[in-house]
Amino acid sequence: MVANKIIYNKQSKEAHLQGGVKIYQGDVLYLDVEEASVNMQDKQAKLSHLYLQSTMGIWLMSKQGSGREGVYSFKRGVISGCDITYPLWHLNVSSGTYNSQKEYMSVWNPRFYVGAVPVFYLPYFVAPTGNVRKSGLLAPETSFSNKQGFMYMQPLFIAPFNRWDITLSPQIRTNRGYGGQFEFAFADRDNKTALLQMRYFQNTDDYMRENNLKNQYIYGGTFSYITDHIFTRGDDAKDGFYADITYMNDIEYMRLKSLNAAFNTRLYESRINYFVNGNKNYFGTYFKYYLDLSKFSNQDTFQVLPHMQYHHYTDSLFFENLLYTFDLQSKYVTRYNGYGYFQNTISLPIGVAVPLFNNYISLGASFDMYATSVLLQNAQGLVDARNETLKNRINYSVGSYNISLNSDLARPYKHLFHSVHLEAIFSGALYKYTSRAVSDERYEAYNALLEQGIDSSLLALYWNPSDIVDVIKNKHKVDLRLSQYFYGKNGKELFYWRMYQRLFMQDSFLTKNQVLQNELGFSPIDGLNLSASTFFSYSLERVSEASVNASFNKWGLDSNLTYYFKLDPMYLSSGLYSTGNTGFARGRVGYNFGLFRFDANVGYDVGVGYLKDWYVTISKDIRCFGVGFKLAQDMRPTLTANNDITPITNQYVKVEFRFVPLANTGLSYRFKE
């Protein structure tokens, strides 16, 4: 506490401080007044020309005020978090209270100004002034839409304890309906956060009819949690738990999280994983649940409940160069309608690697023992490509050889370092046993159906040998790889080229459906990165997949251009492709002009042939204040009453204000939806 003059009355026990009265908390100025009268008995203080500053940097100024035990009241004050001389934003308030102990400020009739321009008015406003979580109303979300009307969401934050909190977020859309969200978050002993969300929304009858929607009531829930060292504490082993679970009856569930949320994924995967990982052993158990919102029902979707794995890492056997690994997996795949199955799989490769010619070449040989057993459930009526009924039990085992020959060469130059990797792996079956369902005859019969080009819905009626068993293991093949890298000064990667080709020596059907993979990357100057990849299909005599990526990030410019194309694969180990295709192109650019920052992003769906989304943003941040203007359009897939996914064009404009460190707020308007 510092003052030019202090007068103390022993009888009344009052202290009068005059001239430059300052009170510090540590090294930070906390209270600055011209005059202060303090009653030492009841701790009541009368302040003149006061200046208060919170630990978060928010300050207030008022001509008159009073305080007692850390609670200050004032009239006709100015509040800001900017420079005190020329604040970029400030609030003019008629009166208010600042509680320094509980670190919050409540004010009446605040008028928000940007410079000297009033932006908006509130009758009452409460805001935290510290970094400790406080219960109260969060900044609301508001938006206008020509289709959904006025939209308003008001979150209420409840934080009774340090380790958990609740957020209630009711929302209303005047032309659509109403709903809300419940969010519960808690932190464990290691401060790993778990989050539970539940959401509900009710569409009005008129909105249902006008848009031909499937679901009037939209609901769902989400739970996520990641943690480790649950039962382990040392360095020898580590365990971990991962959960990401979501259920929803409509794709709109994800978009209702906020007023302008975007979500276009139709297939959603929920997972629960637990693992224990040691120096030599690994154990994991996994649950996977797939939710396909493009289907009328998910009763025929395969679910993995559960999948368990034990793995022994590469280890020596008998002598140092003789190596082996062991892997055991069990999984139960089920669904409500259609067949499911239990599957147990064992893999035990044993091999040796020998360096030759002064380590210029390495020769490796291994023997891989692989076996799997499948028990079908509810497989009545399931037939193979020969229209023969399948038995419930399917066994498949193969003992395969692997002979590898590789070489790693490197040479330094004056300004470059060049490395080359060459590898050839020959593999195939020495012994195999297969049940009739996965025999070569059934495999060839199914491939014959594929070559006929029959409809996918008819093809789904037949048993596919490649669905459960990897029949590629018993095929004689060779894998060829070439990669080379050029590095500059300080180890910077300048150029790379990777190539891969698989050839089947006794299966012409598989050989002609393989692809030649090429990947290139080039960084000629700092900030510029170019990369490309191509997958050439011999059977189609064309490129089946390609991508190009270029980015430049230097001199304040942030830009990226991406193009991707792929023929839609029928998920088969045989490698066939359908005649459809998918692809996209996306460009992004951003630059800070000093007066403002400009960002733009555009995406184009090459496969369907339409502009997928775009946005243009102009923003400016000046220390304690920021403003942004965004104009955007996206396509929103919507689930209709006849179970079709119908895209809806959504165009909107958004203005956002950032009052640092107080709050962010904004307003958006959807003028075409």
Image (cartoon, helix red, strand yellow):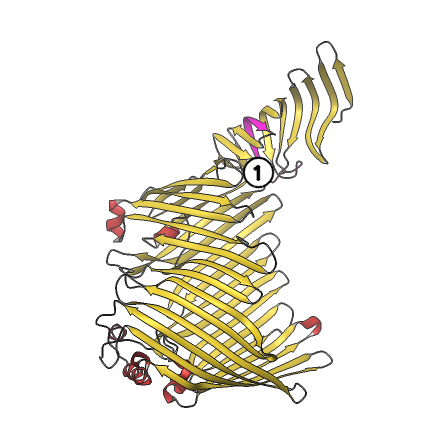
Q: Position of residue 69 (x, y in %)?
A: 62, 23
Q: Quadrant of residue 7?
A: top right
Q: Amino acid at mark 1?
A: Val
User: Residue 526: image x %, image y %?
Assistant: 65, 69
Disc 1 element: loop
Quadrant of the rendered structure where residue 149 is? top left
Q: Position of residue 427 (x, y in %)?
A: 47, 85
- Left or right: residue 26 versus residue 621 is right
In reply to whether residue 537 is colored magenta, the answer given is: no
Residue 366 vertical placement versus 557 (above, below): below
Which residue reaches farthest front? 318
Above or below, 66 against 607 in this view is above
Magenta stretch in the rendered image: 84-100
Residue 603 placement, left or right of 386: right
User: In percent of the image, x 27 and y 82: which residue is there?
Assistant: 449
Mainly helix, strand or loop, the magenta region? strand
Residues 391 and 195: in front is 391
Can residue 545 be seen in the rendering of this structure?
yes
- The quadrant in which the N terminus is found is top right
Q: Is residue 575 visible?
A: no
Q: Which residue in the protein does label 1 denote?
A: 132
Seen at 27% across and 83% down, the residue is: 452
Q: Nearer the viewer, residue 173 or 45?
A: 45
In the picture shown, does residue 536 fall above or below 98? Answer: below
| Category of crowding for the residue at label 1, using alpha-carbon neighbours closer than 10 angstroms: few (below 14), some (14–19), many (at least 20) | few
User: Is 541 in front, or is 667?
Assistant: 541
